[in-house]
């Protein structure tokens, strides 16, 4: 595992930990702030399943926590593997009607700092496919180069 990979997954782990801490905190806060359970005949039934408001609150908390987890994974997928910035500038590549000629339709994102690109398939032929990340040396090199191709030198400022 290279250091950039480590950083990428460490960032993911930190995000998951942060989301977990947040949702745990939210649960504890709700348990603390909600009024104590009422006496029912001689017993104190648990609030969950007996107090409608509290049960609804737990339901909301559950949905919110799953949403947070889903967001963490979704967000990670669209980040540059090198600098962790969001992938930008989506364009459509390939063609629906000429798949054999121009390739399958995909949405291609790039890192604006030129570290690589991400191809997200539009058609999922063989089950769920994960987006493909392609690292690149520096995609802005040819644009930043000086006019004629013979020069071979880069302009510095
Ligand atoms: Zn990048």
Image: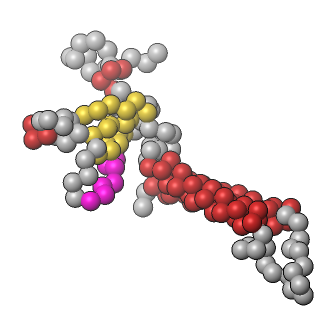
Q: Percent position (x, y) of residue 79?
A: 47, 44
Looking at the image, residue 113 sits to the left or right of residue 72; the answer is: left
Residue drawn at the location 44% of the way across and 38% of the way down: 87
Predominant SS of the magenta segment: loop
Location of residue 50 by image quarter: bottom right
Q: Is residue 29 visible?
A: yes
Location of residue 46 by image quarter: bottom right
Q: Is residue 27 visible?
A: no
Protein image colouring: secondary structure
Q: Is residue 35 above or below residue 146?
A: below
**Which residue appears farthest toward the left when viewing the image?**
101
Residue drawn at the location 63% of the way across and 56% of the way down: 64
Q: Percent position (x, y) of residue 93?
A: 25, 34
Start-end of magenta stretch = 127-134
**66 is within the stretch colored magenta:** no
Q: Is residue 128 above or below residue 136?
A: below
Location of residue 17 by image quarter: bottom right
């Amino acid at each position: 595992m290279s250091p950039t990979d480590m950083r990428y997954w460490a960032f993911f782990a930190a995000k998951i930990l942060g989301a977990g801490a947040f949702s745990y905190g939210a649960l504890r806060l709700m348990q603390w702030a909600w009024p104590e359970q009422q006496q029912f005949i001689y017993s104190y039934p648990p609030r969950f399943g007996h107090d409608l408001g509290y049960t609804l609150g737990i339901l909301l908390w559950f949905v919110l926590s799953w949403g947070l987890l889903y967001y963490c994974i979704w967000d990670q997928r669209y980040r540059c593997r090198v600098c962790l910035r969001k992938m930008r500038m989506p364009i459509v590549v390939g063609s629906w009607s000429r798949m054999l000629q121009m390739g399958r339709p995909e949405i291609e994102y790039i890192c604006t700092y030129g570290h690589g690109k991400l191809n997200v398939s539009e058609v999922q032929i063989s089950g769920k496919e994960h987006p493909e990340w392609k690292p690149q040396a520096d995609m802005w090199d040819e644009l930043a180069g000086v006019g004629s191709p013979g020069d071979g030198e880069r302009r510095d400022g």
